[in-house]
Every structure is written in structure tokens, then in C-alpha cells.
Amino acid sequence: MFPFGETLKDCVETEIAIIDVGGVRGQALEAIKQEWPEIKGRLILQDLAHVFEDGEEKGLPSWMETSRASFFEPQVLHGT
């Protein structure tokens, strides 16, 4: 796996560490967080709005943020 812990060791809590674009249920972010719990930056699950309809994000861990967007459009999140 990519060395996320080493690469993101200087990331602070207010900075975006990872955006999982098209991540659906956040399995990749959960695996990264489990392997490298020391990552301090924001971990964001980004997908189409309908993926998060009907409270789908309620089952996600509290540390995982969500963002509604399409990878066919310009990225809406930048930096912090």
C-alpha cells in the first residue's frame, strides 16, 4: 500500500490529507485510517449527491467528512 503515514506526517488537523473521489461507502479511507491512525489531516469521502441521500452518511465514522461532487466537474475542495 502507498505509504500514507510517511507522506502525510506533517499534515495538520485543519488541512485536507486525503479526498477519496468516488469512494461510495468509504472503505478505502477506513483501511487507510486503520493502518495509519496517526494521520492528523482531514479525510474526506467525495461522491455524487445521490450516494449520500436518505442519511447514508449516518453510518460513517465521525472522523470521515463527506463532500457531494462529481469527478466530471472541477474539484470543489482545495487546500484546507
Image (cartoon, grey):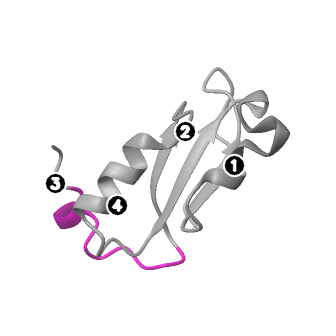
Circle nearer the N terminus (3, 1): 3
Which residue: 25% across, 73% down? Answer: 9
Residue 12 image-quadrant placement = bottom left
Residue receiving disc 3: 3
Task: Judge left or right: residue 72 versus residue 44.
Answer: right
Circle nearer the N terminus (1, 2): 2
Task: Judge left or right: residue 13 versus residue 45.
Answer: left
Which residue: 64% across, 20% down? Answer: 72
In reply to whether residue 13 is colored magenta, the answer given is yes
The kind of residue tagged 3 is Pro
Circle nearer the N terminus (3, 2): 3
Mark 3 or mark 2, whichever is nearer to me: 2
**How would you classify the magenta stretch by its main secondary structure?**
loop
x and y percentages locating residue 5 in the rendered image: 21, 65
| Mark-to-mark CA distance, 3 and 1 | 27 Å
Secondary structure of the residue carrying tag 4 is: helix
The kind of residue tagged 2 is Arg
x and y percentages locating residue 4 in the rendered image: 24, 57
Circle nearer the N terminus (4, 2): 2
Residue receiving disc 2: 25
x and y percentages locating residue 1 in the rendered image: 15, 43
Secondary structure of the residue carrying tag 1 is: helix
Tell me if mark 4 has few (under 14), some (14-19) or many (20+) residues whose alpha carbon lies within 10 angstroms of its own. Answer: some
Question: CB under 8 Å between callouts 4 and 2?
Answer: no
The magenta span reads 4-14
Residue receiving disc 4: 33
Front-lying residue, 49 or 12:
49
| Mark-to-mark CA distance, 1 and 2 | 8 Å
